[in-house]
Amino acid sequence: MTFFRKALIVIFTFLLVDGLNSGLTAKNLVKYAIATLPTPVLHTADFRGIFGGEDGETLRLDEDKQIKELEFIAFPKTVFKVEEIIEGNGKKIYKITTKDYPYPTDEGYFIDSRFVKTVEIKPPERPKELPSKQTVIQNLLSTEDSNYLWSGNYKNGIPQIPLFYKPTSLLPEKIREKWMLKGLDCSGLLYYATNGCTPRNTSSLVNYGDSAQIAGLKVDEIIQKVESLDIIVWIGHLIIILVKEHIIESRLDYDKHKKGFQGGVKIRQLKEVLVEIMESRVPVDNYKDEVKEGKKKFVIRRWYE
């Protein structure tokens, strides 16, 4: 082998290794991402399997017609730490963590890279400014009759999803609305109304704010104790008091046999709802308080200052 050929091989090898290292370095530089759009966060990296499936037009729903892989929808400017980059079919999915959703997970949390911009240096967290009490109430009122959506917290949905995951045929309206993640669940209703200033899950909301002292009280006595925007909550469900006489809540199914009560966001009489709750639950001052065996509990938390 001539000296010239040896030199060419050395140069080629150096350029190849350098190029690979540069690619790895560039990939590793993606450490943080900032939501530029409302960003769906799933506990699976299989976005295409959810939005389209094998035929490009099937939305993956469970027996309740919900997307159970959805965790929440991050507000614009939410900051994510990128833990891993998953590439396939020309798309990038990021495995992430975020302070806006600090809940443990075995599967991990994932976002589509097209909803965010990436940065190398850690940016400041999303600014959170709690709206005025009247604005929160108006936001709540604006959601009446909205769809119920598991883990939904964006009333009008995300119109970019059908653009990023374009269905191969014209979808029925109800399926298209779910494809866009249009709707709210119980805690998502409060998250939406407060611009993402409240905890996203009921597991946090049962201890959020101050306790309304309701242990041992009857329905009419509890009504006298509550204030506007207090929340009636237990792990699994949240109800928001609008004023002393009315509540607003989002439920999957109020009464599937009753016309107009197939689910969604509804305003109801506070007394009627408390009577229903107290048929199976006991009021306590703090969620850690013990109740009689076989009984369930609920708390009322006063969170708005």
Image (spheres, rainbow, N blue to C red):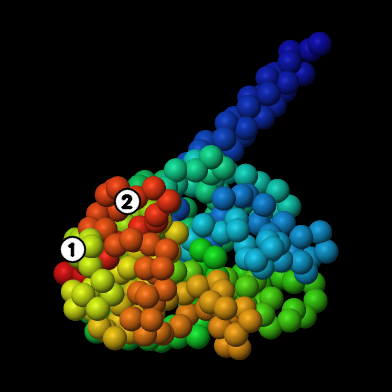
Q: Residue at x 72, y 56 (%)?
A: 49
Type of amino acid under label 2: Val
Residue 70 is left or right of residue 220, and the answer is right
- x, y percent for residue 242: 30, 82
Instruction: Point out the tag, 1 or 2, that comes first from the N-terminus.
Output: 1
- x, y percent for residue 71: 51, 57
Q: In the image as oriented, which residue stretches furthest toward the top?
A: 1
Q: Residue at x 56, y 59 (%)?
A: 70
Q: Nearer the viewer, residue 228 or 94?
A: 228
Which quadrant of the figure contains the C terminus?
bottom left
Asked if disc 1 and disc 2 are in contact, CB closer than 8 Å, the reply is: no
Q: Under tag 2, what secondary structure?
A: loop
Q: Which residue is mark 1?
A: 213
- x, y percent for residue 220: 24, 78
* Vertical side of 34 occupied by 161: above or below: below
**In which quarter of the view is residue 53 placed?**
bottom right
- x, y percent for residue 83: 49, 41
- Residue 291, labelled with which disc? 2
Residue 184 in view in this figure = no
Cα separation between marks 1 and 2: 15 Å
Q: Nearer the viewer, residue 223 or 138?
A: 223
Type of amino acid under label 1: Gln
Residue 204 in view in this figure = yes
Q: Residue at x 37, y 68 (%)?
A: 278
Which quadrant of the figure contains the N terminus?
top right
Residue 79 is left or right of residue 230, and the answer is right
Q: Under tag 1, what secondary structure?
A: loop
Quick one: label 1, few (<14), some, or many (20+) residues within 10 Å? some
